[in-house]
Structure formats: C-alpha cells, structure tokens
C-alpha cells in the first residue's frame, strides 16, 4: 500500500523540486543523491519505498506545477529535460493540490483542511498520510493562553479571532486527520503545548524545525571540530545572500529574526559559550535560487595565537532541501506505523532548530538517526 | 614522579612552541587552549599533569632554545613577553638537548641515542620517558629486506650501510631505551615490521603519523558531512601556501609527495570513491609560520544540480601542533603505564595518516579517543 | 620653515599611527610604504618634507599618546619597538594636543579652537598649518538655513543653538585661523555653502571626504575593470567586519548610513547603473583593528553567461590611513602655498566620497593627482 | 563590403562561442555584452559592423560546428535555445572550415593554407580577411637560425624539416594571403624576426598574445592599485582550476610553462620587483568550462604592517574570450584598412603577454586603445 505526502506550500520551490525528484526516482531517471535514507547506515526496509509515495497538498498560489517546474528548470534547479519527460506525472499531482480553505472560524478552516487530507487518502487508497510544512516562513505569533492547553485551544478556535498561525493550524488539521506532521520551516508548527497534547492524545509523532541545508549544516560540523580540539572560537560572523521566493520572504525583518535565531543555537550549544558576531540574511534578486553564504571564524590557538578560517558555500537550497523532504516523509511514516508519538527528537540531523535538548554535532545526530532507523525496522 | 618528553627535532618550531607552552602552563601564565586532553570528554586522572612534564631531545641544529623562541615571537607564533619571562626555564631545557650522535654503524648511533635518553631519565629521576619525533620530514626510504624482521635488522645495523631512515633509527633507539614512541611527522618512524616486532617484544606502545592541524583537519569533518548527507563530491582541489622551515623542507618533491599522499587518504576512505583534484604544497617565504590553505569542493545534489564550497584556512601550524604534542606525550605515557603495547590506533584523532584501518571521521575518532582515555584511568 | 599638521581627533587610531609614522620617518627608522606622495609620478619638491611636519590637535579623549601607541602596538598596528624608541617624541607631541574647547555659543567655541591653532603656529614658528579631521564619524546634521550663507551662519553661531556638527565647526575654526582643511571622515566638514564661502573669501583650499582604504579602494579598480570590458555587473554585495573604536561608532545606525552611502557612489557612477546588493558594516570586537571585508560580484558575460567573483580584504585600517594623512597634509600645504582655494577635486584619489563631479576610476584619479602635484611645483 | 574572420582552431570552444555570438548579434538575439568595441570610448565608425563579419577557418578536428555548439550549451557556455535557432547559420559556416592541409614541406602546407584563405575571400567577395589564432596552445619551439630572417626562413621552408610551430606557419600563411594576423594564444605566432620582416614587407599589422580573460585581467587592475598606493606586495600566489579542452592541453608541462610565464609579466613589470609566489594551472575535469582561480596577495602597509587579500574568480573562459575575438577582428581589419603595419602594441588591453614594451595597467591600456580607435576613424 502507498503512503501519502501532503505538502503545505505544495507549489513552492522545495515542494516542486521534491515532487519532480520523486517522480524522476520512480521513473528510474535519477539517483537518490542527497537522500540520507539511502545511506547504508540509515537505509531500512521499514521505510516506504520512494516509488510508493503519492503527493498532494495545500497552497495559496495557483500557478500550475508544470509552470513552477519549468521556472525551476530555467533557474538551473532541476534539469529541463526531466520536466519535459515528467509532464504527465506533474499534471496528475496538480489535481491533488487544493487551495487553502477559508472559513469564518479557524475551527471550520481546520475541518476543511482535514477533509481535504482525508479525501486525498481515500481517493488514492493510502495506508497513511504524512503532512509536511514547506510553506513560506511566517513571523512568530503573539503568545496566547489558548496555546497552552488543548481544551482552551478548541474553545478559542470556535471564535472568529484567529489565534493560531497558519503553520500551527496546519499541524492541528494534520493531527485531526490522524497524520504525522513535520515542519521543515522555522514557523511555529506543532511547537505549542496544546498541539503537543493533541498529538500525544492521538498517538501521532511530529518533527521539525527548519531544514538544515546550508551555512548551519557547515556550522554543525565545524563548531564541533573547534570544540573537540579545545580551540577557542572568538567570533563567527556570516552573511547569506539569496534571491528566489524564500529570499524575499526572509528579508522581511520578522521572518529574518526567526531564521537568524535558529541559526545561532548550534554555536552556543556546541561551544558552551557565545562567540562575537552575527549571521545576516540579505535578499539579492540576481542570486536567484543558488544561495551564497560566507562565514568568517576567528579563533585562538595555543598561547592565544590568533587564527581564522572563512568559507563560501554556493548551494542550491531547493536541491538540498528536496531529498530531505523525501527522507522525512519516509521516516515519519515509518515512525507513525511503529507507534511512535510526540516529538521525534532523533530527527535533529535534519534541522537547524531541532526539537528537544539534543546534541548539535552533525556526527552525533547521525548516530542517533541511524539508531532510530534501526528501531523502526 | 615526573614524565620525560624526549623530542627528536627539539630545536624546531613545533618542539620549541611545545616547550614554551608547557613552561607557560606550569607557571600559570596561559590556559591549555588547543589541548585535547583538557576536553571534559578526554580529561583523565591517569594522564601525567602538564606540570610534571620534563623536556629534552636530539637535534642536528645548535641554535639556542632562547634564540629560536625569540624568532618565533617575532613571527607571532608565541607572545614575546612569555619568552622574556621564561628565559630561565628555556635555558635549563637547552642543557637537555643533545646533538644527534654520529657513528660508524647505525647500531652504534642508536646505542648512543639510547644512552642519551637513559642519562636524561636518570638525571631527572623520571618515572618514564616518551619519545616524540618532530624533526624535519624525510623522504620515504628504499625498501630493504632488513625492514621486515628484527633479527635481520639487528644484523644489518652492525654493518656500515645505513638502512634505516633517521626517524626509524630514532624509534629503534626509543624502544631500546624502553620508551613509547610517537611520530608526529609523515616520516617512516616505527612503521616497519622489524620495529613493530621490537615494540611488542618490549611491551611498548607507539603512535602516528603526521599531526592533523590544518586542511586535513577540515577534511576530516567536511568529507563526513558530504558522506552523511549522501551528496556526491565531484572534485576536491587544494593548495597549501607555507613559509617557515617546514615549508622549505616540504617543498622538496620527495617530502611533498609523502605529505600529499597522507592528505588524500581521508577523502577516498571517507567517501568510498576518489573525487577529481589534487592538493599542492607551495613554499612562499613571506607566508612564514601562518599557513594559508585554500580548498575548492564541487559536488552534486539532488537531480545532479552542481554546487560548490570553498574555504580558506589561515592557521599557525606550530601553535596548532604544540598542544597536540603535549596531549600525545600525556596519552602515550599513560598508555605505557597501563601496559599497552603495539600501535595505538585510538590516537587516529591526532593524525592525518593514522595507524590501522580506522574511521577517518573526526567525530568517530573523538569517540574512540574518549573511550581510550577512559580505559587508561 | 616647518609645516604644522593639526589633527582633529588627535588621540584616535589614525592620528596616532600618523604621528608615530612621521616620527619614525624623521628618525630614519622606516620607509614611506603606503605614502602616495613618494610614488615617482607624484613626488614633488613643492611638498614639505616629512621631516618638516609638526603635529598637534584637538581631542575629547585624554589618554596619553604613549598609552594609545602602546595599545596600537599590542593590536599589531605599529611595531612595539618603534613605540619604545619614540617615547620622547610622542611625549613632546602630547603637549600640543588640546582638549576640545567648550563654550556657551559655537562662535566662542570656534574662537577658542582658532586660538589653539594660532598658538600652536606661533609656538613652533610654523610657516603654515593644515587642519585634518580624523575624529569619530558623526551623523549627518539636520539641514538648517544658516548652512547656506556665511552671513546667516555667523549670526546663528552667536546664539546658544548649535547648528554646526563638530566637523563643520572644526572647518570653520580652521578657516578662521587661515588654514587649509581636509576631512578624512564621512562627516560634513566643509561641505556647506556657508563654509565654502568662507574658504573662498579667505583664499583657502579644502579637501575630502572619507579616506579610501579598503573595500572602496578595491571597488575603484574593479568596477572600472568591468566597465572597460563592457561586462554587465548584476549584483555587488559586501560586508565589512571591524572592531576597534571606529567600528563601534560606525555600527551606530546613523553613522553606518553615512558611511554606506559614500561606499555606493563609486558603483553607480562608474558603471552607469546600480547593480543589486548592499554593503553592510558590522562591529565584531574580536576583529580589532584589522578589518575583514568580503564582497561578492555576480556579472554576465557574452550571451548572458553568469559568472562571479568574490574577494576578501584583510587590512589594517589605521596603517592604510596614516600614510594618506601624511600625503594629504603635504599636498594641502603645498596647494595653500600655491594659492589654490576652494575644493581640491584633484584629491579624489584619496577619498571614498570625493568633492566634485569626478571620475571614480582609481587610475583616472591617479592621473589627475599626478597632474595636480606637477602644477604645485 | 564584408570582412572575413579566418579562425585557426575554428572548431574549438573560443571559436565556436565567437561564431554563435556573432550570428546571435546579427540576428538581434543578444546584446554585445563583453564587447569592448561597444564601449563609448572605443566605439568607432571605422570598425566593420558585427553584421558584416563572415567566418571560416582551419581545424584538425572534424566534429561539426552544431555538435560543438550543442556541447557548449550543455556546459552552460551558450544558451541552448540560441543553438537551436541558429542551426542554419552554423551549418553554413561549417562549409567554410577546412582541414589543416598536410604537405611534404612547410612551404607547401603554407601555400595550401594561403589558397584556402584566398578561396574563402573570393567565394564571399570579402573586402579583406583577418586571421586569428585560437588553436590549442603549443609548446615553445626550439630556436632556429631560420627564425631570424625572411630569406633564411623561405629557404628552410622548402626542406622537409619543419622549423615553424603550427602557430607561426599560420601567421606566415596569413601574411602571404595579405591578411592581418592576431594571436589570441600564448603560442609563438608572428613573434619571430623573419615573420615581422614579412608583415612589414607586405604592409600588414599583427597583434597578440594570449587573451586576458581571468586571473591576469584582475592582476592588471590590482597590481597597479598596490603600485599607485605605494604599498609593498610581498607575495602573490595563485591557482587556476580548469577543465575543458584547453585545460587538458595546458596541464601538459610545456604548455603550462608557456602560459604561466605570460601570467607573471604583469606583476614584475607593474610593481618594479618580483614578489614571492607562483601561479599554477591544474586540470580538474569536473570544473569544465568555468574556470576557478584563487589568488592570495600578502602585502605590507605603513610601518611594515602585514595585510592580505584573496580573490576567487569563477568565470566562463570562452564567454569572456569570444567577444574579445570579435573586437580584435574588427580592430585588426580597421588597422589594416588604415594602412598600419607591424605590431599593434595598442592592443595590449586584450592580452596577457602584449607585444612591445607597454604599460601593464589595464586603465593605461584602455586609454591607449581608445586613442588607437580614434586614429582609425
Ligand atoms: N530550501 C531550503 O533549503 C530550506 C531550508 C530550510 C527551510 N526552508 C523553508 O521551506 C519553506 C519553503 O521554501 P521555498 O524555497 O520552497 O519557498 P517558496 O516561497 O518557493 O514556497 C513557499 C510556498 O508556500 C506557499 N504558501 C505561503 N503561505 C501558505 C499557507 N499559509 N498555506 C499554504 N501554502 C502557503 C506559497 O504560495 C509558496 O508556493 C520556507 O519556509 C523556507 O524557509 C527551506
Ligand atoms: N606544525 C604542524 O602543524 C605539523 C603538522 C604535522 C606534521 N608536522 C611535522 O612536524 C615536523 C616538525 O615541523 P617544524 O615546523 O617544527 O619544522 P622545523 O623545520 O622548524 O623543525 C625541524 C627540526 O628538526 C631538526 N632535525 C632535522 N633532522 C633531524 C634529525 N635527523 N634528528 C634530529 N633533529 C633533526 C631540525 O634541525 C629542526 O630543528 C615536520 O616533519 C612537520 O612535517 C608539523
Ligand atoms: N582608518 C581608516 O582606514 C579610515 C578610513 C576612512 C575614514 N576613516 C575615518 O577616520 C576617523 C578616525 O578613525 P579612527 O579609527 O582613528 O577612530 P578612533 O575612534 O580611534 O579615533 C577617533 C578620535 O576622535 C576623537 N573625537 C571624537 N569626537 C571628537 C570631536 N568632536 N573633536 C575632537 N576629537 C573627537 C575620539 O576621542 C578619538 O580619539 C573616523 O571618522 C573614520 O571613519 C578612517
Ligand atoms: N578561453 C580563454 O579565455 C582563453 C584566454 C586566453 C587564451 N586562450 C587560448 O585560446 C586557445 C583556444 O582555447 P579553447 O578553449 O577554444 O581550446 P579548445 O581546445 O576548445 O580548442 C582548440 C582548437 O584548436 C584546434 N587545433 C589544435 N591544433 C590545431 C592546429 N595546429 N591548427 C588548427 N587547429 C588546431 C583543436 O582541434 C580545437 O578545436 C587556447 O590556445 C587557449 O590557451 C583562451
Ligand atoms: Na575566500
Ligand atoms: Na573565498
């Protein structure tokens, strides 16, 4: 039986690259480069095969998948010939992408979203559906008492006042539909006590936050290197130049703040102290989908001798993110089947801002992930 | 009781920085930055304290330690005020540095070296002595049948033909003196079957090769990152610009070849394939003791999308190496006391070209090192 | 006869490095590296020799010159031994540095400043004095009608309302003292119609703004390269990481804005269009006096093919600025003697934000400077 | 009337990009980005318009132009849609590309080449033909007495011993056909006294050597920057990583040596001294047609303070070279028409290793070029 992958933000760059890539894998037209669940240490028979993933989702945009895929081909994110070849498959998925329902109360909106997901499962006869949030990053919501208990939340959702940000409403709807939920964005998602209560009540697992694809990925191996060598990191400063739709969103101060904060955790938690310096995000339209990040690290060695390293990372964010989305869909589905509920802290390997009080070293996270995959089998 | 540290190449940059640093630690004038044995995961009461290390060694050069330390201060490797303050301590160590003995046969030379070490132990009433090779890198020797068994080697050493390179003769002398031996250089050292036989016969441990202080240190965290993410590294090219005494030696083709080869192991063994590209070493006098390494990595992500990263490392090699020399002295002494003999493969964390068939991931090597330190206690 | 150099901000990094350097040149202890007036194309007998420059100035800080010089030596900006050797000379200059006068009206304050300068000239029997502003960057002032004519300004200065920023008051005082004025900072200085009127009335020349020492220096050769090759610059983004006193000041939004704006002129005026991207200034204390700037330029070649370059500049700002301060003192003194008055647009070579509608290509500016030097002789 | 452009190496990357680009310009499908003769300061009615250039040439390869263009499109050098659109035009040019004639003596080979060029001129009714060498770089030839006078050369060419390298034979044939000759490669070309004699005898101009497209272009603006600022360049080290056909050729030691030497001239001749350091060329297949060059410059400022800059250049060599090939064709044709003969030293702007004793500053070369263009009109 097949597994459904319901993408919130299904017409975005990450979503479309994931959908094109899964179709290409199914058609045998590509290798699973960048797919962590293909690594010998993680690979497991417990995971649904790539060929058994069926895609659908919500989006507020209406551009067709084929149009979005063509735009990504022009930008060099996906090969143009793949988009041509997979025209038929993309058109088919398009029919499973629904507009985001609007309603007078958030309770009604959530109910409509849940219905969309249930209908998707029925239509394709799916064993289970995993919901992944890959929509635009939103600002952190104002705190509200209804966030703290499920009872209060349910009551509040009936009123015309919206208390949940879109990502949390999506998580709520996913849980109501009996689905695992994974947040690939820095948005709030399931990170509210009320939603945790709901997930546990329904026996559903959830994961997040903020896919680790660029500068933070590097930090998660370089900061441990300095720590293991007992070197003293004096400053760590960086700048991320990015164009594309995500870039425009992140350049807005509120989203930028959410993202920059999650990028800093790895340093202070790995090193045990906070070095000087900041990380900036800048929107530069000409950069397009290939982000350029530059970081400068100054550090002291024996006898205080000052040293430095810098790196430039020139990566295609969507092409780095998409295989992780497939990995997370497979892992969350298997965790759901294995009866796991609550936060999947073992997925920290994938995230800039992982759930739980976890080790930020990529190597330690990989060991935890491999162990997790084993327990699912 | 105190532990002796006998340095082969005791007047070189690494040696002098180690000696200055140990004296500064003893005088409470500095922190053990860059000392791995100070990391909470490695720290152990089984290791001799810094304050109990006593230094001596061999060198072919005759410049006084104070002169060498002053030159390192001018070059920015060690603080000038430390050299002033520690003048007395450096002068004292100077008396324990012996010229390399010359003799008609290598047997006689080795006997004289052994006698120098024994005399050093006696003079300072040392519990044990560890011998560390930090002399200039030598070319790989011609293979010779006498390298393969201790009996054949002993016979050959009596003849006027020299079959052992200097580093291996130093290892031989160390073992004959009942000392553990660690090779911080890419030279042959104890890596000959005959010398392994001798070490095991005497119940002595040995370690090596080639301190991991710059580009290879970065490779040992970055290559695993690409591997864990299942990304495809297409090329990895690098250049190391260095001045200083070591730079001049390494620019000679034979030494350069020895060094470059040990730098490549980490890639092919971590990734499981050999990407395009090479690593060069260039001697640029003005660069002095602060090496600049630049690496370019091209890699493919999902759907073959081409990406790239580059880094520049600007490190003071001697200031990175010296704390590791102190670490290795402490660890080898404790291993000796704990009855370990033969190759110390658990020290791979420290080396570009480690003994044994070990994992090249720095994180895995750190786990192995921490476990090793625990077993010594 | 000697020439006086009156520095506003005489206890700052740039000022102290200039004073130490001039003393070292006089003592024959250093070469005029970085001094443009030593270039064969610019050198001229019309310029007062380095050995004939006498220093004094105003500052609001009171730390002694020797203390400031020692701090710069610790930071690696000037050699420690020079500071030791020149102790006597620095102490002598210290006596010619006056606290900034305070008074009820700006007219009175200016009169006191003028008196300080006149007294300095008298005391040392100087032929003429040049005033250079190297004080902290200030925010741009609110526009005021009194800025537009000398008459209105003089009237206004008598009132208790301060309408001139500190840099402009310094320019006013300089002109009243019969001195040429050069602004090495991005502050307003003499750039007000009322002050221009005064300078011309007194037959005095003035120059500025904002010494070109790092990223903008590079832009002034790289942007013309792209222009001459008719390549299309798509984006130019940069970040400047700096510590030191100047860094702290510039990190304040108002000063930062003043500085960033002057950094952008070179691009749009050289290329004829404004590419995407911005330049940031970040204060990172550990970076100290050695600024690190990183720039990424994306550009299109024939048939639109996308290409890119990036550079990292790691320069000691004060050591780059100080020789230019000496150059400007010599050139302004000679221009004064040669009877030049009003803006010295031929000094554009030295400035990020030059006076007048000038070519921003460094090479063109150099040709103009060499021609200027010839006309003085 | 039209102007012929005869390319030696007409099936190579530079040639094919030039041919595709000229056709695209003629069809109004692209802008002349990267074409220096479109710069307002150089543009001149004396130059034949792009639309009047007709292409032909010699090559030893036989792959069709369309195939080569398609390969360049896959590599990202030219847009794929252009190649599709211009299929017809490329096929037409293909018929004017001749195999390199083989003969018993070089005299006979040259005669056959001359005949090919003459036939091309006749067939298209061209006013004149310019010959440009864009063939693979060859090793420097052994010196031979016949290189020194035209008489000796003519006699020698009749014998079966080949004394001219291919590039010089091409120059000889070009001159015999009454054509101006430009060498875009580092090969010998017309740089032999005997060939100079021939060019002058026939009243023909020639230009070269080695198109300046990457690292050396940067050096020609950065080295003058250091010189104009009287800064002391201590070392300049670089590495060029390149794939592609040219990369494979240049990786051969002899060609590499020829190329590296021409890259160094700019430094010593601009600075007046030779800093430490070297420039390497490395063949890295995965890098393909987009060369990556990295350079590190260490320099001293005032009081000897050490500083550094580094840059990374990521350029598509063929897309940088092709517009210059069109520029050179236009300029050489106009110079020929204007009656110029002998070396065109005013073209130094285009070359790494320019003819004559010229200024290496790009800005000075640009002034000379603009002046040259004016004199042609
Ligand atoms: N690409 C990466 O490497 C990466 C890494 C970490 C996190 N992320 C996060 O993934 C998300 C997607 O990135 P992207 O590059 O695909 O962005 P994108 O702008 O291309 O796509 C976002 C999509 O979300 C849709 N959307 C917006 N609000 C929505 C809502 N309320 N409900 C449903 N759909 C909504 C938009 O219409 C759009 O189609 C972002 O939040 C980004 O921060 C991406
Ligand atoms: N500094 C680092 O980061 C680092 C890292 C890995 C390996 N190493 C290795 O450490 C060694 C020392 O480096 P360094 O920078 O101190 O070099 P150095 O040139 O400053 O010192 C080498 C010393 O060895 C002495 N010597 C030469 N031959 C000898 C012999 N046969 N017996 C005794 N002494 C001899 C020399 O006289 C000199 O004093 C080199 O082999 C280097 O490759 C250094
Ligand atoms: N260093 C460079 O490369 C460079 C380049 C361009 C411009 N500048 C400008 O030069 C100036 C000096 O730079 P710095 O690094 O020496 O800074 P700094 O902070 O070390 O020194 C500034 C000095 O000015 C003094 N000061 C402040 N306000 C004053 C006032 N109203 N009157 C008199 N003195 C006053 C301060 O007390 C301090 O001693 C800054 O404005 C900077 O932006 C420097
Ligand atoms: N691309 C640049 O930026 C650049 C810059 C400076 C110089 N150059 C020089 O331009 C030349 C061409 O570069 P490319 O990248 O096009 O190389 P390429 O290898 O793609 O093309 C060279 C062509 O020359 C042909 N050839 C070889 N020997 C020949 C001969 N004897 N007669 C006729 N044709 C012959 C080859 O078959 C091939 O088609 C090289 O010498 C290169 O060094 C290129
Ligand atoms: Na860099
Ligand atoms: Na870089």
Image (tube, coloured by chain):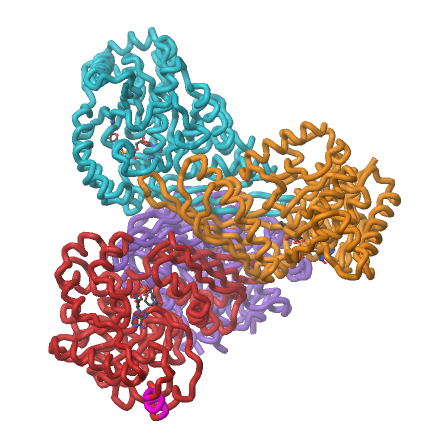
Chain colours: A red, B purple, C orange, D cyan
Q: Camera-side residue: B6 or C205?
A: C205
Determine whether, in the image, residue C6 is placed left or right of residue A166.
right
Quarter containing the N terminus of chain D: top left
Residue B52: % across, % down: 57, 71
Q: Which residues are magenta?
A: A152-158
Residue pictured at 30% horizontal, 80% vertical: A171
Most distant residue in the bottom direction: A151
Q: Nearer the viewer, residue A342 or A272?
A: A342
Q: Can you say whether A242 is above or below A361 in the image? A: above
- Residue A17 against residue D328 in the figure, above or below: below
Vertical side of B356 occupied by C149: above or below: above
Q: Residue at x 29, y 7 (%)?
A: D155
Is residue A153 one of those drawn in magenta? yes
Residue A287, percent across and down?
37, 53
Q: Is residue D273 left or right of residue B295?
A: right
Q: Quadrant of the C terminus of chain D?
A: top left
Q: Position of residue A211 (x, y in %)?
A: 34, 69
Residue D163 visible, this angle: no
| Coordinates of residue C331 in the picture (x, y in percent) | 71, 36
Check the image and report above or below for D136 versus D124: below
Q: Is residue A232 visible?
A: yes
* Residue A251 part of the magenta segment: no
| Quadrant housing residue D103 | top left
Residue in the picture at 64% in, 56% down: C140
Q: How many marks?
A: 0
Q: Nearer the viewer, residue C4 or B156?
A: C4
| Res D27 → quadrant | top left
Position of B60 with respect to A372 (left or right) is: right
Left or right, residue B125 beside residue D366? right
Kindly report the secondary structure that dominates the magenta region of the rendered protein: helix
Give the quarter of the image for residue A123. bottom left
């Amino acid at each position: 039986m097949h597994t459904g992958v319901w993408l919130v933000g299904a017409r975005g760059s990450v979503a479309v690259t994931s959908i094109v890539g899964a179709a290409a894998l199914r058609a045998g037209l590509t290798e699973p480069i960048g797919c962590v669940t293909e690594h010998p240490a993680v690979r497991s028979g417990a995971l649904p095969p790539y060929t058994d993933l069926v895609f659908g989702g919500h989006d507020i945009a209406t551009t067709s998948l084929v149009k979005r895929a063509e735009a990504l081909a022009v930008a060099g994110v996906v090969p143009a010939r793949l988009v041509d070849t997979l025209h038929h498959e993309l058109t088919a998925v398009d029919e499973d992408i629904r507009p985001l329902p609007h309603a007078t109360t958030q309770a009604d909106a959530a109910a409509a979203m849940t219905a969309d997901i249930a209908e998707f499962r029925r239509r394709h006869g799916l064993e289970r559906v995993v919901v992944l949030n890959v929509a635009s990053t939103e600002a952190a919501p104002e705190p509200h008492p209804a966030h703290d208990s499920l009872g209060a939340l349910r009551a509040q959702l009936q009123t015309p006042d919206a208390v949940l940000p879109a990502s949390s409403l999506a998580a709520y709807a996913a849980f109501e539909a009996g689905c695992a939920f994974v947040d690939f964005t820095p948005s709030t998602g399931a990170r509210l006590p009320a939603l945790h209560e709901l997930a546990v009540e329904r026996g559903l697992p959830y994961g997040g936050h903020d896919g680790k694809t660029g500068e933070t990925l590097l930090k998660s191996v370089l900061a441990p290197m300095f720590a293991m060598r007992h070197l003293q990191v004096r400053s760590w400063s960086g700048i991320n130049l990015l164009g594309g739709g995500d870039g425009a969103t992140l350049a807005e101060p509120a989203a930028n703040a959410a993202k920059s904060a999650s990028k800093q955790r790895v340093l202070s938690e790995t090193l045990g102290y906070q070095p000087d310096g900041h990380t900036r995000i800048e929107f530069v339209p000409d950069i397009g989908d290939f982000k350029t990040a530059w970081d400068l690290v100054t550090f002291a060695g024996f006898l205080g001798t000052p040293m430095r390293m810098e790196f430039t990372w020139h990566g295609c964010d969507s092409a780095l993110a998409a295989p992780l989305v497939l990995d997370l869909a497979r892992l969350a589905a298997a965790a759901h089947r294995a009866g796991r509920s609550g936060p999947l802290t073992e997925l920290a390997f994938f995230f800039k801002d992982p759930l739980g009080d976890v080790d930020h070293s990529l190597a330690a996270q990989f060991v935890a992930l491999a162990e997790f995959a084993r327990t699912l089998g």
